[in-house]
């Protein structure tokens, strides 16, 4: 049964890398108005769906087993919630890509907002990658570090409204609405990454696990 549990953790790691890559490419499609790249991200929804089903099957198989893999009953429910976080992160990346495809060949956001969305994309991808490392290394310190970085994302999302509400906004209502929606997708993606990391202690903890080696310096965002 430990092998099944290890397989579940490995699935979570692979899916965290998938959603990080999806958001990275969705962000590139956003700032470059790349419709083809947006379509590729949307197509990855099928891979994301399969990963979710497989992880849920492993988690439920462990849950109904007569031989628990851990003394903490919170482990498997936490893993199931983590699967949900990852799925929603992937879906949010798809929402960003769908916004690009919907407006293509026009831009979703005006050039003046591109630096802001580049930064939001950078933070989102970093959070997804670090959440995966937190799961892999059972690193509660790293998980807590993600919260402060998520605050940076919250600030970017909140201050956007002052920009699009400014009387000199010259890009129309449609682009203001699109910018607010895409900003919200990034903000929610970040929230789910933090939620995933915060479940770390329970998800990867099991008796006899000695192969976890924390990465040094992994908590810095560059």
Image (cartoon, rainbow, N blue to C red):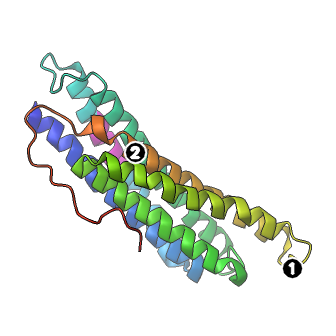
Q: Residue at x 39, y 54 (%)?
A: 46
Give the x, y percent position of residue 202.
Answer: 29, 34
Residue 133 included in the magenta stretch of the image: no
Q: Is residue 50 visible?
A: no
- Residue 159 figure quarter: bottom right
| Residue 137 versus residue 205 in the image, above or below | below
Q: Position of residue 167 (x, y in %)?
A: 92, 72
Residue at position x 55%, y 73% in the image = 119
Query: Where does the image place residue 37, in percent across and percent down from the top left?
Result: 48, 75
> Do callouts 2 and 1 mark residues in contact (Cβ within 8 Å)?
no
Q: Quadrant of the C terminus?
A: bottom left
Up the image or down, 75 lies above or below 158; here it is above
49 displayed left or right of 172 = left
In this rendered view, identify the residue nearer to me: 220 or 130.
220
| Residue 52 percent location from the top left of the image | 35, 44
The crowd level at tag 1 (other Cα within 10 Å; few <14, some 14-19, many 20+) is: few
Q: Secondary structure at mark 2?
A: helix
Against 58, residue 97 (above or below) is: below
Q: Nearer the viewer, residue 30 or 148?
A: 148
Which residue is the site of mark 2?
A: 196
Quadrant of residue 63 within the rendered picture: top left
Residue 153, placed above or below residue 59: below
Chief secondary structure of the magenta span? helix
Q: Which residue shows up at 28% across the image and 30% down it?
A: 75
Res. 159 mark: none
In the rendered structure, does residue 52 fall within the stretch colored magenta? yes
Could you tell me which quadrant the N terminus lies in? top left
At mark 1, the secondary structure is: loop
Q: Which residues are magenta?
A: 49-56
Between disc 2 and disc 1, whose residue precedes? 1
Q: Which residue carries the number 1 mark? A: 170
């Amino acid at each position: 049964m430990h092998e099944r549990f290890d397989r579940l953790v490995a699935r979570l790691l692979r899916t965290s890398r998938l959603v990080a890559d999806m958001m990275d490419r969705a962000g590139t499609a956003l700032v470059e108005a790349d419709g083809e790249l947006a379509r590729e991200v949307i197509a990855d929804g099928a891979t994301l769906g399969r990963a979710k089903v497989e992880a849920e099957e492993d988690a439920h198989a462990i849950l109904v087993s007569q031989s628990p893999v851990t003394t903490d009953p919170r482990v498997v429910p936490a893993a199931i919630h983590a699967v949900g976080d990852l799925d929603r992160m992937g879906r949010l990346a798809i929402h960003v890509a769908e916004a690009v495809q919907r407006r293509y060949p026009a831009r979703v956001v005006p050039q003046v907002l591109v630096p802001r969305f580049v930064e939001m994309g950078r933070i989102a991808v970093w959070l997804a990658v670090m959440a995966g490392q937190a799961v892999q290394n059972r690193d509660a310190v790293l998980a807590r570090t993600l919260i402060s970085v998520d605050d940076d994302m919250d600030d970017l999302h909140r201050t956007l409204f002052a920009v699009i509400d400014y009387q000199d906004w010259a890009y129309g209502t449609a682009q203001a609405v699109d910018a607010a929606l895409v900003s919200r997708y990034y903000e929610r993606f970040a929230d789910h990454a933090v939620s995933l990391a915060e479940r770390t202690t329970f998800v990867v903890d099991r008796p006899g696990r000695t192969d976890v080696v924390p990465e040094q310096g992994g908590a810095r965002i560059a």
